[in-house]
Image: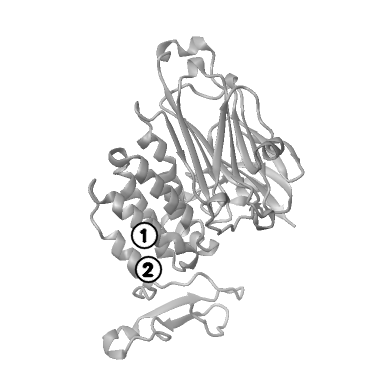
Amino acid sequence: MVKWPKTVAGVTAYHSCFQHSLRSASFLNGEEKLKAWRNCNRTGWWDEENYSQCPYSQEVTQILHAFSQRHLNATNALEFSHQLAAFTRDAAKFADKEDVIYLAYMLEKLILHMEEIKDQLADAVIEIASNIMLVDDHVLWMAQKDKKACARIVQCVARISNQTLSSNAQLVSKVSLNIALEAFWIKPSVFVGMTCIAFQKLPANPGRLRLNSDTKSRETDQSLNFKCNPGNQNASLVNFSSMVNAVAIASVHLPHSAFPSSAAWQSVDNSSCKLQFIAFRNGKLFPSTANSSHLAGYGKQRVIGTPVVFVKIDGCNFGNLTSPLIITLKHFTQGINPIAVFWAFDLLDGHGGWWGEGCHIISSADNITTLHSTHFGNFAVLMVSI
């Protein structure tokens, strides 16, 4: 990391790209004149660094750049995805926004081959996206601000079920350290309701269980899983945890009454829809690049205090839900004044942000908040940290 010199407010500081590099002068071939710059604004605070004139100095970034240049096809995409998944297991050490930007680009390339390779490629994409959630928050924020990289990664994960569900695959279930996905074919005309609970198993040594937003253990029992049951009965997070020796972090209930009356389905009575649930352990792939938490927070600075859950139905057109989704989220941080929100991808010139329309809290106690929503999307609870 560059150590910037003391600078007068309102003045731009410059720093050689290679001042602390071990590269020889002969190797640089004049590149020692290239400089990064950073403005000390009039209030005496540093603005973001600008390294646009500097070649990549980190080996990780050089390797990811090389990965991104490879041509992918149906023959090599699976092997490529396994290599990338293995490389990103050290993502906690990635320190350059370009690392995340390259990964977003490569996930988009892999998704193009999902219909051909399906299941195994989906496993790798989920693992890569999960690994990216180990990257430092500020690096993710910079990648989102520059190239909307985090939003693109989330959208890649959301496309998995559309690409993998087929007549031969009625169910898709994926688990990883930080992301779980469950998707089904459903027929709304005979739908009886569905509840999905995101959980992780309790380890043999309870003292090793970590539920905070920065979980980095790679043990199998720390992976997120989904347990889904048909029916119109909403399940309790607390009761679930006591029954199956696991800790539940989120649940989503889609009631039978969420769909319009059968008369509205006459023209599409034989249609089947793709219903999917995704749980993100935390909100690291949803960084607010322009303090968009103000948009949902009525002027107060708030942080994401819960997991993020995604619910969506594809393939059927039925308008608005006639009964709300019921979403229950466990807090991983202490806070006050919680508000229910969803991620609106089109806010802030496409960078996205949290918004509260159609969402409201119906209860919040004992580190668990339950909310209703009249639409699908990515949901979380924002709160003021204490």
Q: Quarter of the image holding residue 28?
A: bottom left
Q: Quadrant of the C terminus?
A: bottom right
Please rate how many residues cluster around mark 1, counting C-alpha atoms within 10 Å: few if below 14, some from 14 to 19, many from 20: many
Q: Position of residue 341 (x, y in %)?
A: 61, 42
Q: Earlier in the sequence, mark 2 or mark 1?
A: 2
Real-space CA distance between mark 2 and mark 1, rounded to the nearest whole angstrom: 8 Å
Residue found 66% across the figure and 55% down from its top = 205
| Label 1 sits on residue | 102
Please rate how many residues cluster around mark 2, counting C-alpha atoms within 10 Å: few if below 14, some from 14 to 19, many from 20: many
The number of discs equals 2
Q: Secondary structure at mark 2?
A: helix
| Label 2 sits on residue | 61
Q: Secondary structure at mark 1?
A: helix
Q: Which mark is residue 255?
A: none
- Is disc 2 in contact with disc 1, using a CB cutoff of under 8 Å? yes
Q: Position of residue 106 (x, y in %)?
A: 34, 54
Q: Position of residue 166 (x, y in %)?
A: 35, 29
Which of 264/275 is in front? 275
Q: Give the amino acid at mark 2.
A: Thr
Q: Give the amino acid at mark 1.
A: Tyr
Q: Quarter of the image holding residue 36?
A: bottom left
Residue found 53% across the figure and 24% down from its top = 320
